[in-house]
Image: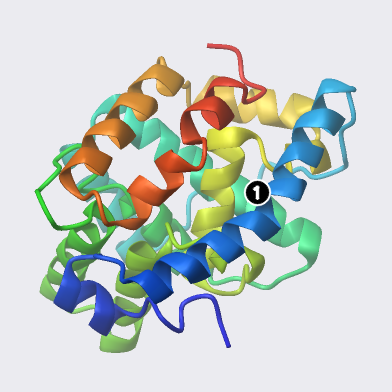
């Protein structure tokens, strides 16, 4: 049973991301398994631990493909600077975690998913999760570019699923690698496995721009608009505290 088995696109699209009791229970169990790792990351980072995780100059380049360039252009047109820079950081953090874990990835699709994953985050709609709407936007956008259907579906599902607890355990899946990158950027999870100088370089190139305050407020608004969604669960489990205490100066 995979983390997304009860949270696939059919469910997301038909319900707008509304959870039933069984799904809520599954998410809470998944969240409970994640908390020790998050606390461990905070403690190890506080103690100054850092690992060898780093991307070299070649690995830091954006994929040189038509799809990646179109996705980047779309994101630059639609995202506020603070969300855009977060999306770049999510790409790099997810990529370095895959390198650490020796998981092969499709860099083009990973970048496309990462750069577009929050395309609707700043535009809440009552009763319909931002990740679901973002997935729909991406599907329409990529289809309009005549991207092969299998790639469209992978990106769509990656965006829709990236806020599902548990997916970050599978970095070979687009939802998982984007989720893992988000967890690093939001709360510092697994940052102790990365070289701190490299992390600082990523942040210098893609500054946080008062990210903590802005993302906490955006999550509050999203949760109020979709109170039975995954973001609301995340907020109820201490999202604000995790972001506030993340090892990033703001």
Looking at the image, can residue 55 be seen? no
Query: Residue 110: x, y in percent?
Result: 48, 63
Q: Which of 88 and 3 is in front in this view?
A: 3
The quadrant holding residue 219 is top left
Q: Mark 1 points at which residue?
A: 58
Packing grade of label 1 (10 A; few <14, some 14-19, many >=20) is: few
Q: Residue at x 17, y 60 (%)?
A: 133
Q: Residue at x 71, y 71 (%)?
A: 103
Classify residue 125 as left or right of residue 67. Answer: left
Looking at the image, can residue 226 be seen? yes
The quadrant holding residue 49 is top right
| SS label for mark 1 | loop
Query: Residue 69: x, y in percent?
Result: 32, 54
Residue 172, above or below 195: below
Residue 9, above or below 72: below
Tally the marks. Answer: 1
Outermost residue, front side: 21
Classify residue 53 as left or right of residue 30. Answer: right
Query: Residue 148: x, y in percent?
Result: 27, 85
Query: Residue 187: x, y in percent?
Result: 59, 34
Classify residue 15 as left or right of residue 31. Answer: left
């Amino acid at each position: 049973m995979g983390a997304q088995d009860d949270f696939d696109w059919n469910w997301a699209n038909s319900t707008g991301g509304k959870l039933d009791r069984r799904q809520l229970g599954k998410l809470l169990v998944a969240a409970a398994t994640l908390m020790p790792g998050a606390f461990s990351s905070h403690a190890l980072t506080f103690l100054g631990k850092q690992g060898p995780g780093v991307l070299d100059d070649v690995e830091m380049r954006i994929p040189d493909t038509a799809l990646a360039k179109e996705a980047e252009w779309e994101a630059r047109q639609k995202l506020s600077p603070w969300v855009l820079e977060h999306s770049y950081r999510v790409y790099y953090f997810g990529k370095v975690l895959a390198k650490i874990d020796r998981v092969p990835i499709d860099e083009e699709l990973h970048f496309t998913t990462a750069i577009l994953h929050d395309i609707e985050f700043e535009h809440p709609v009552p009763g319909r999760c931002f990740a679901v709407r973002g997935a729909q936007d991406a599907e329409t956008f990529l289809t309009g570019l005549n991207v092969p259907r299998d790639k469209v579906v992978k990106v769509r599902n990656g965006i829709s699923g990236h806020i599902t607890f548990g997916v970050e355990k599978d970095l070979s899946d687009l939802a998982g690698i984007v989720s893992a990158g988000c967890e690093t950027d939001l709360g510092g999870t697994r940052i102790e496995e990365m070289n701190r100088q490299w992390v600082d370089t990523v942040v210098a190139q893609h500054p946080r721009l008062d990210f903590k305050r802005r993302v906490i407020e955006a999550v509050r608004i999203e949760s109020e608009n979709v109170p039975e969604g995954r973001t609301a669960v995340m907020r109820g489990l201490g999202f604000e505290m995790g972001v506030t205490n993340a090892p990033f100066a703001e």
